[in-house]
Image (cartoon, rainbow, N blue to C red):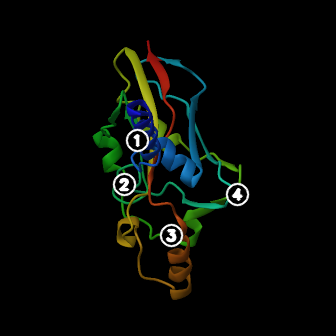
Amino acid sequence: MLKIILIAAMVLLMSCAEDSPQSPMTSIEKNGLVLELSTAKSKISSGEIPDLILKMRNASDTNIVIPLFLDGSIEMERYPHTYFLINGKPQNLPQSVKENNGNLVPLSPNNFITLRQNEVYMPDMHELNCSLKEILKEKGTYNLSFVFCMESENPEDWGFDKGNEKEIELTRQLFSKVPKQTFVSNGVKIEVI
């Protein structure tokens, strides 16, 4: 009898853990957005810009609305935040990247895309890849993952601004469909030689 109770308790605990919002697999499965990071070169020279490629795939059976990478995203001045984890820690942006940003362009309907079932979007990674040039200077092996953070429910954190009422309303409708979560890609190893 005690064995049956213990087994039932274990099954219950395991099912609760699978439904936990802190489990990255659960959040990916619930919203269907899968980030796949890859590289054309796994070995680079010190100071070389890595060639990382990101595929954002809708693995759900419904459409998903996501924002494009915006000015100020890499600097975390507005959502979505876009950055790399390097050996498990958020990248520290070089001062040169932080200084390049000027005024932020207001959020508009053009800043969103809708991914249909199994559709893949490949964002331009040039600015993000360049941000790694100064970080990946020392010889060694680096494990990189990409983070796409859309957690904020506050429109001002995304760069909403005054403007055409019709455009603002459409922007708010699209914004309301964005999954307010953080998604993390698989890891990719880069060796600096």
Q: Amino acid at mark 2?
A: Asn
Which quarter of the image is occupied by the C terminus?
Answer: top left
Q: CA distance from mark 1 to mark 4?
A: 34 Å
Height in image: 73 above or below 91?
A: below
Relative image position of residue 134 (x, y in whole percent): 36, 30
Kindly state the secondary structure of the residue where label 2 is placed. loop
Tell us which disc is closer to us: 3 or 1.
Answer: 1
Between residue 88 and residue 142, name the one nearer to us: 88
Please report whichever mark, 2 or 4, sits nearer to the chain's N-terminal start. Answer: 2
Height in image: 50 above or below 22?
A: above
Q: CA distance from mark 3 to mark 1?
A: 35 Å
Kindly state the secondary structure of the residue where label 4 is placed. loop
Height in image: 76 above or below 105?
A: above
Q: Which mark, residue 175?
A: 3
Quickly name the residue at label 1: 13
**Identity of the residue drawn at 35% across and 44% down:** 97
Q: CA distance from mark 2 to mark 4?
A: 32 Å
Residue 115 placement: quadrant: bottom right
Relative image position of residue 184 (x, y in whole percent): 46, 41
Quickly name the residue at label 4: 116
Q: Kindly indicate whether the residue at mark 1 contacts the one at mark 3 (C-beta within 8 angstroms).
A: no
